[in-house]
Image (cartoon, rainbow, N blue to C red):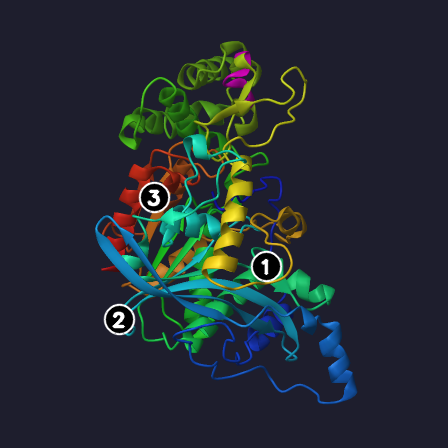
Amino acid sequence: MTRLMTIRPATVGLVALSMFVLADAASGQDAKPQQPSSQPATSQPSATPSGPKAGPSSSRGNAATAASGETRRLPEDSTTKQTITVNGRTLAFTATAGSLRLFNGRGEPSADIAYTAYHLDGADTHSRPVTFFINGGPGAASAYLQLGCAGPWRLSIEGDAAVSSASPELKPNAETWLDFTDLVFIDPVDTGYSRFVSNDEDVRKRFFSVDGDVNALAVTIRRYLEKTDRLLSPKFIVTESYGGIRGPKIVRELQTEQGVGVSGLILVSPLLDFREFGGTSLMQYVISLPSMAAIARQAKHPVTRADMADVEAYARGDFLTDLIKGEADREATTRLADSVSALTGIEQTVTRRLAGRLHVSEFRREFDRRDGKVTGRYDGSVLGFDPDPDSSEGHFGDPSGDPLIAPLTSAAVDLTMHTLNWRPDGPYHLLNGSVEHTWDFGRGINPAQSISELRQILASDPKLKLLVGHGLFDLATPYFGSKIRLDQLPAYASPDRMKLVVYPGGHMFYSREASRQAFRSEAEALMK
């Protein structure tokens, strides 16, 4: 899962950063030239053509550099030659694990952003696509997408392998995207090995904000393209979960502020608008109902998106109509509650007590309460024991997400240190909860959303394409939320440019082989 990003519905009062912060970030977050790698490398990317603004050479400047954490710099990039053989095909490629340093508007170092890149050997870099992968959270590293979906090596994260004690051994990934695009996996600051090198609290605040984060990631992408001489390549962006907020904003930032065009955007299990995920919004019940019903049906027999057509029609029709009538309308409320009970399998006494307004957390606990189990949030078809089944309050984690943290972390560290020969000091953060807890979603009447930017990037570039992928059983970012939002786009978002695909699975639907294969085919078609 991505990611296992945690979306906090309660944090819905969101607003943009102040303009002076944006100007400071945009004007100065560039990378200094990298020195040639001391690791055994076969083909090193060209040095960065430009550096930060010249800083003071006085002792005050040196003191500022020391105080900023210069000694914590990540090691030089490591570039190695690799080969995998899968399904009768052999892929020879160059792998680079390294980082780009970002600076503030005064030319002072702010953060080292770690990345892992895979370039197919012998390809024409001017015509071959390059794709950037960023996870969500905020606070999730890109290992979910790299090791679960598109990278050259994969870790099984479903079934018996989805437990904390599972072996973290990686295998060649038959569904790697490396056949048709080069891959760059980016870890935002304080995820993976990325880290702050500044002790300035204002720097942290800027990075841990909606717009500051977008600016930093867009600058990182531009700097990587310059560093590796890939500005002429077709460029694609893949983001996951909270990446639904990040993705369209990053593309817009690249287009308008960084001078980089993007050919396509792929959103994996995205959240596009926080207004629909909590508070008093009635839409939260509308968008989650089809996923709850899919989970209930999956418990009896396998289901696909096509099997949910009746529930989708009910959710946006009679369900919404009765919901709007309000709880004071007893006839509508009873009808609503009984229909929700029939569709989700939740006892009628419970749905009536809740007036048919079944929150995700209540569904998760009530679905199999008789057996003392709770459903997953990232994948509601996964069940796990409730640690405190007799408690009047819920004290449970996510059985579809929490067990993945240990094997994914170990696999990412082992890959980086031994296969890619890059050995940073300090911990690796797969899912850093402190990032989300300190994130500035804004405070105001405009919650964070990316629909505005999605409209802008599609309208301004008629060649840009959009692919949105979801899992049927995802209760963190239900697919029906994206369906409703995408349906509101104007005619320029035509079917030949925009596509929504929904597969059996959860937030990380790509953990399932058939879903992973199908999604890979869609991504390849988008890039052709």
Q: Residue at x 53, y 35 (%)?
A: 165
Q: Amino acid at mark 3?
A: Asp
* Whole-percent x, y for residue 119 in the image: 35, 66
Q: Quadrant of residue 390?
A: top right
Q: How many marks?
A: 3
Is 247 left or right of 90, judged from the image as shown? right
**Circle 2 crowding by C-alpha within 10 Å: few under 14, some 14–19, many from 20:** few
Q: Is residue 216 visible?
A: yes
Label 2: which secondary element = loop
Q: Magenta span covers which residues?
A: 365-370
Q: Is residue 454 above or below residue 277?
A: below
Which mark, residue 122?
2
Q: Is residue 297 above or below residue 27?
A: above
**Circle 1 crowding by C-alpha within 10 Å: few under 14, some 14–19, many from 20:** some
Query: In the rendered image, which residue does mark 3 sit on?
Result: 487
Query: In the rendered image, which residue does mark 1 sit on?
Result: 16
The kind of secondary structure the magenta stretch mainly shows is helix
Q: Quadrant of the C terminus?
A: bottom left
Is 65 left or right of 378, judged from the image as shown? right
Label 1: which secondary element = loop
